Image (tube, coloured by chain):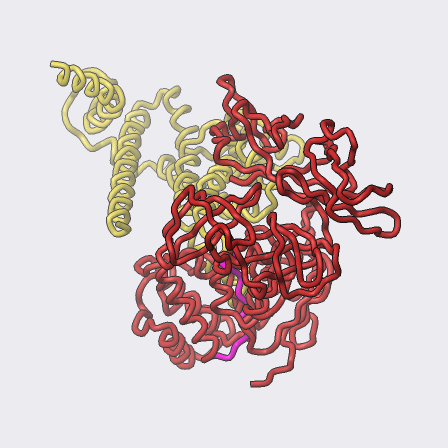
């Protein structure tokens, strides 16, 4: 099946709302006739907004949408040969199933006998023969979803848009519907554009996946491409589970990350800053003496098909999947096959590090208290009269259950010979001259690498303290 | 012992609520001209009520006004509610607030200000009925708005978009999909308008033509007047209105009870 014709093209699509919020920025996409394409991303990434612009419910604030080469950017939704399956079905509750499905055909003044035939065929397609006279409220969620699909495909649209159509169904039903939708796509030959935040769903169903984040396309490719060769840390983290480490290339086919030197297959220049991705299923747990790095098992969770084992090595946490059980507290070694290490060049050298919360509910790093209050980093939170941290709704936040990550730019860190003045200490393990400054890698006593920019030349292996101003740090909170 | 105390209390409250109208109803079937001694059963009050042209005209006029003004108010209130529902949040909040003020505002202020604006400033004669109808529409429309808004909020807001998506024009989507969804709200808004219009005294006194009377304005004037047979006929009218209200409430309760059972 060779299809080279683009059915729909999005060119430099941007959507900025009146309040200044940009939901989608400079989005470019070409979809070929008959493809099953999925927009994948976390909520608020702009995937639904993009879909709504294709459907015509939202008008882009910039850019162009072409259908078969003709602009439909400002065409109202009722004039587009595109139909949508909505997230919560959006069936008309006051009409029976027949009238729901016939609604679109009636708008086009289709003769009655033809409507009856087409509705019958659509109901057969979704396995709901004989449901014509049932009312919407007597149907289960799964059946309602099937009616919603029938109502859309009965109009023979050129493109079918599906906005998280399986989100409201239970897991078993969802799996069934995924396969059915895929079969339906094959049978109908219509182009499907599917929106979901469920990466597994996207991987199962799509010909092509568009990974989105913060209104931008991160990567487009086949499910295999995206899983095996994620283009950046976001995609790696979002698609499947991943261990992601910052590190540096230390020699030919060698990289150091996570406190150890690993052999890998990506050939990059020595000194390149990299992000390494290792899938949990590729982490091998071995005897401590055989491991590239060593650590202690901190948690073991039974997941049915495998155990999910978390190992702490220095300041790093590694998640592994294994069919063999491990004991909490056990010392283990970790190795990874070179093939299973995916290295990406880090363009963004932002340093990320985990910050602890001490029992006085202050932020701490390397046993130094940071001069910033938790109330400043959790929006709307405050300490109540009992000294408990509560959020804007007055509900107590359990500080043991939140994780705070700090981010700081290389140029905001200063090195000093007076080691004790620094927030953390380490030695210079790498340096590269980058035109107007040197880029250093400091390997700290906490087994963490920091990238620091400095215009002066320091020597390799110098012991330094790192001065990191708190006002230059950006904090993110995960619950 | 405690239980009987409770029953007596409830009995007293109910008596306080219903005894006055019951007394009136009993007297409406007698020949008495004053509340006091009962002098024999008679239907003459009812005969007077339905045979005196002045009374019949007043009643039909009031009902026609109530139905007409309510129909207009229902259209305006519904359109307003739909408009507000699909507006941006700030506009919607502003509309909702502006709508609440006339609801809370005293009727006498509404009536008086409409009279000033339409009759004194714009010079529209009260005999055209325009000030009266405008007054009653103003009185009722905010209540229609209030009874339609919750139905819109309960509705799945994407069904309007679904209709557009299936090729319907915005107008078809509104009439075929949105309106049927909010119909219960529209109907109860209309019913509320009818009762409000029937009840109203203040707006009508300020805006009605001199030769026209609604039940309220008529009753107030008649009770001040001396014609005893008219006065006692009004006892009959009160009884009829009360019976109608009781029937209406019963029918509505039975219907909603049935709908509930069908729903579950």
**Residue A228, position as x, y percentages in the image:** 57, 66
Q: Is residue B41 left or right of residue A233?
A: left
Quadrant of residue B190 in the image?
top left
Q: Is residue B36 above or below residue B66?
A: above
Quadrant of residue B44 in the image?
top left
Seen from the viewer's position, the closer of residues A444 and A479 is A444
**Residue B200, position as x, y percentages in the image:** 44, 31
Seen from the viewer's position, the closer of residues A408 and A60 is A408
**Residue A311, position as x, y percentages in the image:** 48, 47
Q: What's the magenta region?
A: A188-199
Q: Is residue A232 magenta?
A: no
Q: Residue at x 65, y 28 (%)?
A: A370
Q: Residue at x 71, y 66 (%)?
A: A11
> What hue does chain A carry in this figure?
red
Q: Is residue A345 left or right of residue A192?
A: right
Seen from the viewer's position, the closer of residues A137 and A262 is A262
**Residue B192, position as x, y percentages in the image:** 40, 39
> What hue does chain B carry in this figure?
yellow
Can residue B261 be seen by looking at this rendering?
yes
Can residue A48 be seen by looking at this rendering?
no
Q: Is residue A189 magenta?
A: yes
Q: Is residue B99 above or below residue A153?
A: above
Q: Is residue B34 above or below residue A41?
A: above
Q: Residue at x 59, y 42 (%)?
A: B89
Q: Is residue B239 left or right of residue A184?
A: left
């Amino acid at each position: 099946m060779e299809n080279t014709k683009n059915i729909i093209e999005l060119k430099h699509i941007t959507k900025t709302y009146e309040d200044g919020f940009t939901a989608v920025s400079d989005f470019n996409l070409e979809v070929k006739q008959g493809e099953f394409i999925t927009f994948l991303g976390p909520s608020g990434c702009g995937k639904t907004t993009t879909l709504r612009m294709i459907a015509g419910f939202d008008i882009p604030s910039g850019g162009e949408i072409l259908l078969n080469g003709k602009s439909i950017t400002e065409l109202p939704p009722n004039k587009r040969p595109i139909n949508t399956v909505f997230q919560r079905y959006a069936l008309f509750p006051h009409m029976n199933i027949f009238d729901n499905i016939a609604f679109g055909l009636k708008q086009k003044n289709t003769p009655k006998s033809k409507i009856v035939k087409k509705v019958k065929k659509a109901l057969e397609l979704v396995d709901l023969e004989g449901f014509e006279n049932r009312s919407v409220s007597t149907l289960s969620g799964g059946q309602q979803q099937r009616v919603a699909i029938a109502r859309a495909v009965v109009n023979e649209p050129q493109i079918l848009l599906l906005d998280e159509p399986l989100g409201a169904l239970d897991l078993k039903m969802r799996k069934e519907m995924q396969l059915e939708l895929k079969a339906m796509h094959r049978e109908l030959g219509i182009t499907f554009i599917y929106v979901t935040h469920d990466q597994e769903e996207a991987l199962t169903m799509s010909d092509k996946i568009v990974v989105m984040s913060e209104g931008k396309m991160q990567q487009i490719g086949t499910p295999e491409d995206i899983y095996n060769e994620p283009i950046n840390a976001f995609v790696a983290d979002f698609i499947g589970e991943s261990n992601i480490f910052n590190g540096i290339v230390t020699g030919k086919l060698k990289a150091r990350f996570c406190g150890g030197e690993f052999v890998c297959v990506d050939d990059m220049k020595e000194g390149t800053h990299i992000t390494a991705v290792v899938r949990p299923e590729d982490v091998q747990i071995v005897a401590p003496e055989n491991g590239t790095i060593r650590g202690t098992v901190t948690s073991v969770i039974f997941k049915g098909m495998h155990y999910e084992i978390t190992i702490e090595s220095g300041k790093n946490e590694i998640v592994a999947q294994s069919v063999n059980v491990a004991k909490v507290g056990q010392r283990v070694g970790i190795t990874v096959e070179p093939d299973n290490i995916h290295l990406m060049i880090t363009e963004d050298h932002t340093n990320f590090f985990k910050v602890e919360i001490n029992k006085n509910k202050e932020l701490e790093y390397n046993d130094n208290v940071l001069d910033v209050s938790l109330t400043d980093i959790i929006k709307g939170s405050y300490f109540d009269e009992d000294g408990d941290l509560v959020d804007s709704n007055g509900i107590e936040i359990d500080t043991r259950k939140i994780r705070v990550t700090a981010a700081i730019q290389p140029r905001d860190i200063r090195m000093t010979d007076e080691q004790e003045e620094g927030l953390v200490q380490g030695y210079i393990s790498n340096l590269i001259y980058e035109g107007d400054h040197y880029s250093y890698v400091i390997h700290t006593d906490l087994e963490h690498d920091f990238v620091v920019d400095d215009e002066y030349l320091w020597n390799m292996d110098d012991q330094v303290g790192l001065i990191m101003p708190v006002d230059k740090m950006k904090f993110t909170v995960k619950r | 012992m405690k239980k009987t105390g409770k029953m007596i209390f409830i009995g007293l409250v109910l008596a306080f609520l219903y005894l006055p109208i019951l007394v009136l109803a009993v007297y409406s079937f007698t020949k008495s001209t004053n509340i006091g001694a009962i002098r024999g059963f008679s239907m003459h009050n009812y005969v007077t009520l339905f045979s005196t042209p002045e009374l019949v005209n007043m009643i039909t006029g009031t009902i026609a006004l109530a139905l007409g003004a309510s129909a207009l108010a229902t259209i305006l209130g519904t359109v307003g509610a739909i408009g507000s529902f699909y507006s941006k949040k700030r506009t919607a909040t502003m509309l909702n607030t502006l709508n609440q003020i006339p609801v809370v505002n005293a009727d006498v202020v509404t009536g008086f200000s409409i009279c000033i604006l339409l009759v004194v400033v714009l010079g529209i004669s009260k005999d055209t009925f325009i000030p009266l109808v405008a007054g009653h529409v103003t009185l009722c429309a905010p209540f229609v708005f209030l009874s339609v808004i919750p139905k819109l909020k309960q509705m799945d807001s994407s069904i309007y978009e679904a209709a557009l998506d299936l090729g319907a024009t915005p107008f078809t989507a509104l009439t075929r999909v949105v309106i049927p969804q909010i119909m219960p709200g529209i109907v109860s808004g209309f019913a509320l308008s009818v009762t409000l219009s029937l009840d109203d005294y203040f707006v009508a006194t300020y805006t009605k033509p001199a030769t026209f009377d609604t039940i309220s304005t008529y009753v107030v004037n008649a009770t001040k007047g001396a014609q005893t047979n008219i006065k006692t006929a009004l006892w009959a009218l009160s009884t009829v209105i009360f019976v109608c209200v009781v029937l209406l409430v019963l029918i509505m309760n039975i219907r909603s009870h049935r709908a509930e059972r069908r729903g579950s």
